[in-house]
């Protein structure tokens, strides 16, 4: 049992089918998480993930019913955590939601408590989430809060020389993946990106953006290999280029990063990114670093292996000048 929670008599955790989720949850969450999307688009985005191989690799949505009504729900993402030569089974939890009339009655706590128990019994090692609310709520359930910061760079402070970047093409994904893995493989631990995770990311980054947002996806090649890439969005209203993902391979790739970010920003004044893991942080200018109010990374070790991971990595993670996960790990 993780932290404090109380079961609610007669209420148990159940799988929620995509159709049930579309009917019972999406109309409630659209005002909160739909952004500029209309309902059809919000639904289509949900179904795209739910019906992907990734979304079908385990029950994607779960929840609890009270008198037949689905009152609390969340999404589950199947991930692997690589730690040296070990692989820990990780469960990402997203979109925790209680319908307004049922809030404050323990439903979200009961759902998460039951979920952590089930995951542990099923042999999962660790649960993680990115909190958009005060982390105290999840801390009560046994989650630990990890440093989560935002980095803002002035575009003018970036390398203004010719970047040599070209738009990412449909055939570039294997090369892009190699580039990422060369960098990420140097980390002592990471949330591994399996082919299914890449497929999910690619789908997300390929969906048409809202009207005031432009997607920018650039790659730099050196001897035909992709050595730098930047994926993100020009958010015109915020005068910012928001970085969704980037990586570089070797010195040649690292040397191009600043210029590619500048090219990606175009005429916008700022580049904003989640503070990336240490191996990537040092390739970026210092910029201005602020604690994030949302997307706060939290973990709940469930097994002895995950507790050993936390004991071994804790000091490094909590004391680092950079964060533990990539923006693309956000669920
Ligand atoms: C957060 C949420 C899921 C809680 O659901 P719930 O069923 O009311 O939760 P519980 O009844 O188990 O627990 C209630 C606790 O949540 C806490 N809580 C609610 N909103 C919170 C917030 N923004 N920050 C921190 N804690 C919060 C309350 O303080 C309460 O604790 P208390 O009773 O000890 O004071 C619900 O408020 C919700 O759906 N909010 C909108 C969606 C959202 O923000 N989800 C979280 C995404 S990370």
Image (cartoon, rainbow, N blue to C red):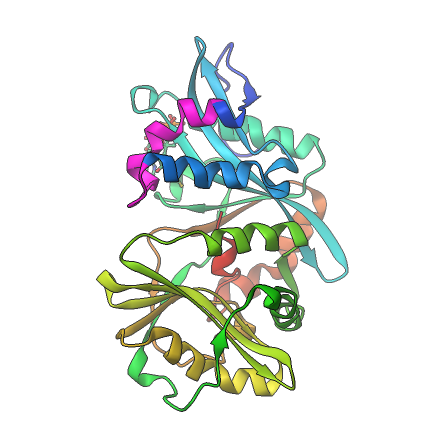
Q: Is residue 195 above or below residue 109?
A: below
The picture places residue 15, in percent across and down from the top left corner, at: 57, 24
- Quarter location, residue 265: bottom left
- The x and y percentages for residue 11 are 50, 14
Check if residue 35 falls in the magenta segment. yes
43 left or right of 267 in image: right
Q: Is residue 121 above or below residue 133?
A: above
Span shown in magenta: 20-38
- Counting from the top left corner in percent of width and height, residue 74 is at 48, 32
Looking at the image, residue 97 lies above or below residue 198:
above
Going by the picture, which residue comes out furthest to the right?
85
What residue is drawn where x is 63% and y is 55%? 311
Magenta span main SS: helix
Count all numbered tags in the image, as a single digit.
0
> Which of the 4 quarters of the picture holds residue 89?
top right
Which residue appears at 35% of the width and 33% of the height? 29
Q: Quadrant of ligand 1?
A: top left
- Does residue 1 show up magenta in the picture? no
Could one spot residue 235 in this view of the protein?
A: yes
Q: Nearer the viewer, residue 253 or 173?
A: 173
| Quarter containing the N terminus | top right
Q: Is residue 34 above or below residue 296?
A: above
Q: Nearer the viewer, residue 183 or 265?
A: 265
> Residue drawn 32% across and 76% down?
266
**Residue 253 in the figure: left or right of residue 158:** right
Q: Could one spot residue 1 in this view of the protein?
A: no
Residue 206 placement (x, y as % from top left): 48, 55
User: Seen from this angle, which residue lies furthest left?
Assistant: 237
Furthest residue toward bottom: 161
């Amino acid at each position: 049992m993780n932290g404090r929670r109380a079961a609610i008599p007669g209420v148990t955790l159940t799988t929620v089918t995509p159709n049930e989720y579309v009917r019972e949850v999406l109309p409630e969450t659209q005002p909160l998480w739909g952004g500029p999307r209309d309902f059809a688009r919000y639904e289509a985005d949900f179904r795209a993930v739910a019906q992907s191989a990734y979304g079908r690799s385990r029950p994607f949505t779960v929840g609890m019913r009270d008198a037949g009504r689905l009152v609390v729900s969340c999404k589950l993402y199947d991930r692997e955590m690589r730690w040296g030569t070990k692989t820990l089974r990780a469960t990402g939890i997203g979109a925790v939601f209680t319908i307004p009339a049922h809030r404050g009655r323990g439903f979200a706590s009961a759902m998460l408590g039951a979920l952590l128990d089930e995951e542990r019994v099923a042999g999962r090692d660790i649960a993680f989430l990115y909190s958009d609310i005060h982390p105290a709520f999840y801390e009560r359930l046994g989650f630990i809060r990890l440093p989560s910061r935002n980095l803002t760079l002035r575009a003018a402070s970036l390398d203004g020389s010719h970047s040599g970047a070209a738009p990412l093409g449909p055939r570039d994904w294997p090369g892009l993946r190699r580039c990422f893995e060369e960098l990420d493989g140097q980390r002592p631990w990471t949330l591994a990106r399996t082919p299914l995770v890449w497929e999910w990311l690619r789908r997300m980054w390929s969906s048409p953006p809202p009207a005031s947002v432009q997607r920018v996806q650039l790659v730099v090649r050196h001897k035909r290999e992709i050595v730098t890439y930047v994926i993100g969005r020009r958010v015109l209203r915020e005068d910012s280029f928001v970085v969704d993902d980037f990586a570089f391979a070797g010195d040649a790739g690292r040397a191009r990063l600043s210029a590619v970010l500048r090219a990606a920003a175009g005429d916008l004044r700022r580049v904003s990114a989640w503070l990336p893991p240490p191996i990537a942080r040092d390739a970026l200018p210092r910029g201005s670093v602020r604690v994030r109010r949302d997307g706060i990374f939290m973990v709940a070790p469930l097994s002895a292996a995950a507790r050993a991971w936390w004991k071994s990595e804790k000091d490094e993670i909590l004391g680092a000048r950079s964060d533990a996960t990539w923006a693309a790990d956000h669920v």
